[in-house]
């Protein structure tokens, strides 16, 4: 998979070269390209932003550097991922879908965001997916791009040393993962549940399944009953 990042803070994406993602890049499974958006500016100050039409606080990223970057990077056929609080909530299902693409191009916003015409133009040349990490506001799209990247690339065949570790993870089967333990069996007066030391694989599987269901019911009942959650959000308090 090829991954491109357009950002005004290229160093923010240095963690891509660390750990498993870095190894996958060294091994050729990933091709990583981080681009400084200012490469495609032409004034002395390498300006990328300007005041919003219509007034208001903050600055907006101008369209021209993105347009030139799209031409230089040959955007056609790629999937353009735009982190934004207005986007589709990012989920494991969306990560799975993005993992089927051959090329992702991340547009990292800053300030008040990116001129809307950048997205409209990109949509004439590529698939555009606007993605929100959650209902809060970050300073920029880089952290979101890193999070989306990690969630996507670990699903690529050959990325994880042991592909089995993906199977039982939170959100893969619609549930949160059961609690996990390692040695020592007893630590500061806290003991690992006996069943996990029993060697009885059927009992262990049953315990884990029940623990996952219980944890999900307690912490994220919306995952068990998505329609109930939607209804709850729709409720308008009586006045
Ligand atoms: N004015 C924008 C708004 O209210 O929607 C927020 C801009 S934010 C300060 C700057 C950039 O951070 C955004 O363009 C986006 O790239 C990124 N960002 C902020 N919050 C995000 C979130 N929840 N999910 C994904 N990206 C986010």
Image (cartoon, rainbow, N blue to C red):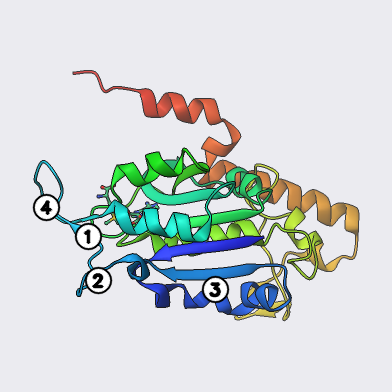
Q: Nearer the viewer, mark 4 or mark 1?
A: 1
Q: Please, what secondary structure does the residue beneath circle 3 have? A: helix
Q: State the separation of the CA atoms marked 4 and 2.
A: 21 Å
- Could you tell me which residue is drawn at 10 percent across and 41 percent down? 54
Give the percent coordinates (x, y) of residue 42. 27, 68
Residue that label 3 marks = 16
Residue that label 1 marks = 49
Residue that label 2 marks = 46
Q: Nearer the viewer, mark 3 or mark 2?
A: 2
Q: Please, what secondary structure does the residue beneath circle 4 have? A: loop
3 or 4: tag closer to the N-terminus = 3
| Mark 2 sits near ligand 1, with its Cβ under 8 Å away | no
4 or 1: tag closer to the N-terminus = 1
Contact between marks 4 and 1 (CB within 8 A): the answer is no
| Left or right: 9, with 195 as reference point | left
Q: Nearer the viewer, mark 2 or mark 1?
A: 2
- Could you tell me which residue is drawn at 55 percent across and 48 percent down? 76
- Could you tell me which residue is drawn at 39 percent across and 65 percent down? 7
Give the percent coordinates (x, y) of residue 226. 54, 31
Contact between marks 2 and 1 (CB within 8 A): the answer is no
- 172, 121: nearer the viewer: 121
| Left or right: 82, with 166 as reference point | left
Q: State the separation of the CA atoms marked 3 and 1.
A: 26 Å
Q: Quadrant of residue 3?
A: bottom right
Crowd rating for badge 4 (residues with CA inside 10 Å; few <14, some 14–19, many 20+): few
Residue that label 4 marks = 57
Q: Is residue 142 visible?
A: yes
Q: State the separation of the CA atoms marked 3 and 4.
A: 32 Å
| Mark 4 sits near ligand 1, with its Cβ under 8 Å away | no
């Amino acid at each position: 998979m090829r991954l491109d990042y357009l950002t005004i803070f290229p160093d923010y994406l240095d963690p891509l070269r660390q750990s498993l993602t870095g190894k996958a890049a060294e091994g050729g499974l990933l091709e990583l390209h981080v681009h400084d958006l200012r490469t495609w500016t032409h004034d002395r100050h390498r300006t990328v932003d300007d005041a919003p039409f219509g007034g208001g606080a903050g600055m907006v990223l101008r369209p021209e550097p993105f347009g030139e970057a799209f031409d230089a990077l040959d955007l056609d056929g790629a999937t353009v991922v735009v982190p934004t609080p207005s986007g589709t909530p990012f989920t494991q299902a969306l990560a799975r879908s993005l993992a089927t693409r051959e090329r992702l191009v991340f547009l990292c916003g800053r300030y008040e965001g990116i001129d809307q015409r950048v997205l409209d133009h990109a949509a004439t040349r590529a698939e555009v997916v606007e993605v929100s990490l959650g209902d809060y506001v970050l300073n920029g799209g880089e952290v979101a791009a890193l999070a989306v990247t990690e969630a996507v690339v670990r699903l690529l065949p050959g990325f994880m040393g042991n592909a089995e570790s993906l199977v039982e993870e939170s959100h893969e089967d619609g549930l949160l993962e059961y609690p996990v333990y390692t040695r020592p069996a007893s630590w500061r007066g806290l003991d690992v549940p006996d069943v996990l030391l029993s060697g009885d694989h059927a009992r262990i599987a049953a315990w884990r399944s029940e623990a996952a269901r219980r944890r999900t019911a307690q912490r994220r009942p919306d995952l068990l009953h998505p329609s109930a959650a939607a209804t709850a959000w729709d409720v308008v308090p009586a006045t």
